Image (cartoon, coloured by chain):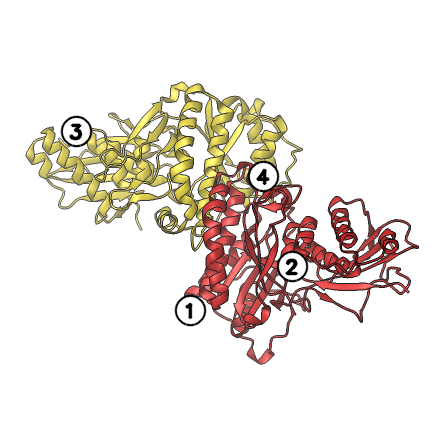
Chain colours: A yellow, B red
Amino acid sequence: MSVIVTATASVNIAVIKYWGKRDEELILPLNDSISATLDTNVMCARTSVCARPDIQKNEIYLNGIKNSFDNKRLQTCLKKIKAIATLQKTVDEEFLSWNVRICSENNFPTAAGLASSAAGYACLVTALAKLYKIQTDISQIARLGSGSACRSVFGGFVRWHAGVKCDGSDSTAAQIVQSTHWPEMRVLVLVVADKEKHTSSSIGMKKSSETSELLKYRVEHCVPRRVDEMINAIKKKDFPRFAELTMKDSNQFHAICLDSYPPFHYLTDVSYKIIDVVHKYNEMYRETKVAYTFDAGPNACLFLLEENVPEVLGVIKYVFPSSNTDYVRGLDVPEEEEHTFVQFPVQPMEENKLQYLIHTKVGDGPQIHYDGPHLLNELGQPLNVLKI
Amino acid sequence: MSVIVTATASVNIAVIKYWGKRDEELILPLNDSISATLDTNVMCARTSVCARPDIQKNEIYLNGIKNSFDNKRLQTCLKKIKAIATLQKTVDEEFLSWNVRICSENNFPTAAGLASSAAGYACLVTALAKLYKIQTDISQIARLGSGSACRSVFGGFVRWHAGVKCDGSDSTAAQIVQSTHWPEMRVLVLVVADKEKHTSSSIGMKKSSETSELLKYRVEHCVPRRVDEMINAIKKKDFPRFAELTMKDSNQFHAICLDSYPPFHYLTDVSYKIIDVVHKYNEMYRETKVAYTFDAGPNACLFLLEENVPEVLGVIKYVFPSSNTDYVRGLDVPEEEEHTFVQFPVQPMEENKLQYLIHTKVGDGPQIHYDGPHLLNELGQPLNVLKI
């Protein structure tokens, strides 16, 4: 009988940003980065894998559509895992000779610019490592799929060490603290309604590395200090410090994009409005209660403590009104606690500038689901294939 | 009979930006900057001054409205000029004891964010220096009125030396080349339709000086090299080099704004569209034919050579359509040469995202107008006073 291994993994949100590679091939970053891995119960990639003698060629299905396996990064990950399995003699040679079938789905829109590749590769590598029974630091393998995926193989707060070695063997991720260390931490993902085409992060990083003079200074002077301070803030659960560092580092990353040549930008007028709302909110309380961070797109991730979620949601609904009946998704917010804001010192935007919000928290990292649901049936055939 | 002195001066457009002060009081900048002074025939401030025994208190009229003279920077300029006149014995003591009346007008909207204070102070200081017959480097005095005004007291391309002395005596402007050196150079000012309130440049500079880590690096490493390269490019009339440096320095200045905390921004979605249009245009020709630069607001200044004006205007009209019958102002563009663009690889925006354009060129600096028109009559009384 065929073994089906199914895993889930989630996206991670960087609070100290990864931007720029020291090695394009091995995906080695210019600087350390730090992120929070989100709860797989709210947003996740789910991946089922199997290896069988009756599979003619390696196959991969993404969100119900058969994709080409002719993808260098994907092949590198599989090759690496099989090589370790060979070395560790964890499975027999016959099993190693079989082809694989991979079926992966995201429960959130891939196009939402929410670093779905990080969740996807973390999930894939977790599932394959289990299938081939290897014992190793899988963050290095996930890194070869998609740089920041290495941070999604752990839960809680995670640091990706840039490393210094040419072969990348010291460019690995490590957990700073588990999610249980700071259970009050919440995340609101604000998905901006956006039709613009943005520079891909790979291309953007390359441009910045080649042309931004400020990036050198960021990498050498700003990030090392910020990484230390951020780890301290997380360990001490110092929210204001954590929040300020998070916002400053997001801003600096976007400053680097603008300092690149030709410049590119991810923040839109709606993103700037979110930045304004967060600073106005914090100023109102004379305390840093919410932080924003933006990746290679206009969507914001807000970090805040559980106790402030109802009020902040009220502010967001006031400034970004929506006709969407399914506007707030994810974790429940007790209705009676929800504030209705009628006054806030920021002019509301017109309706539907935000598509929807996802309310979530920091999670435990990838999970293996022995009991399914699997995306492959007992015969290793994909379920949920879209008819096009 | 009373002497009326009337001067005109124009705004200047920085190609290496001034951002951040080393002394708030004396308005001493953190770094050198370079600009082009625009033609007074297209955009200018006009200022008439007189000193008379019958003026009870110093008076100033701006655009037809009596303003308070209780303005520290204004008083500093007047005091400084009178002190030099005393020292140089250029006028008699009686004349020095009389109060002044100042009347100033801009022929372009003050609110358009076009650094009207630079033109205003350069004009005022030029007129007062003439009235009191002093012989001195007036750029230092204009600097005390409004930092970048010191560059507007010269025509052509001008460098403001930051200087190193605490008293600011070496923080002066000097002409790099006259406007006749590069007579083909043209400027298009794109006035963006914008309702947003932006951080004033004084406040923005202060925030950046206090909080942006990247600004230090810019000041110490990026600007000194760029200043040398820019002077070279101007002297050699190397347009592509001039243009690239101009764009990079504008982008870096806006990157610094974003790296400040809390961050602030001047570029809007329309500004980013202009940036995109310029890069697409240059890519189309595989040659840098147009440069943009943005100051503390969303308006763009494009630098380009005369021969490219008709085509670039065509592109702008295509991407930024307007219902304004007076859309293109300033210098004439021969109608038969105007291109009508029907295809350009940038999606046009909806109508009226730009208010209007001003077509102008690099100019000769402040002028004294012995024959008027003056803004004060023979009795030293203001003309054109608005009835409110």
Labels 1 and 2 in the same subunit: yes
Task: Say above or below: B121 vs A256.
Answer: below
Residue corresponding to mark 3: A134
User: Residue placed farthest to the left in the image?
Assistant: A93
Quick one: label 4, few (<14), some, or many (20+) residues within 10 Å?
some
Q: Earlier in the sequence, mark 1 or mark 2?
A: 2
Q: Which residue lies at the image location 87% right of the left edge and 51% below the top edge?
A: B97
The span from disc 1 to disc 2 (Cα, nearest Å) is 34 Å
State the quadrant of the N terminus of chain B: bottom right
Quadrant in which residue B287 is drawn: bottom left
Along the viewing direction, whichever of A242 and A117 lies nearer the viewer: A242
Q: Are marks 3 and 4 in contact (CB under 8 Å)?
A: no
Quick one: label 1, few (<14), some, or many (20+) residues within 10 Å?
few
Labels 2 and 3 in the same subunit: no
Residue corresponding to mark 1: B285
The span from disc 4 to disc 2 (Cα, nearest Å) is 25 Å
The span from disc 3 to disc 1 (Cα, nearest Å) is 55 Å
Amino acid under label 1? Tyr
Apparent side of residue A378 relative to residue B351 in the rendered image (left or right): left
Labels 1 and 4 in the same subunit: yes
- Under circle 3, the secondary element is loop
Task: Say above or below: A163 vs B371.
Answer: above
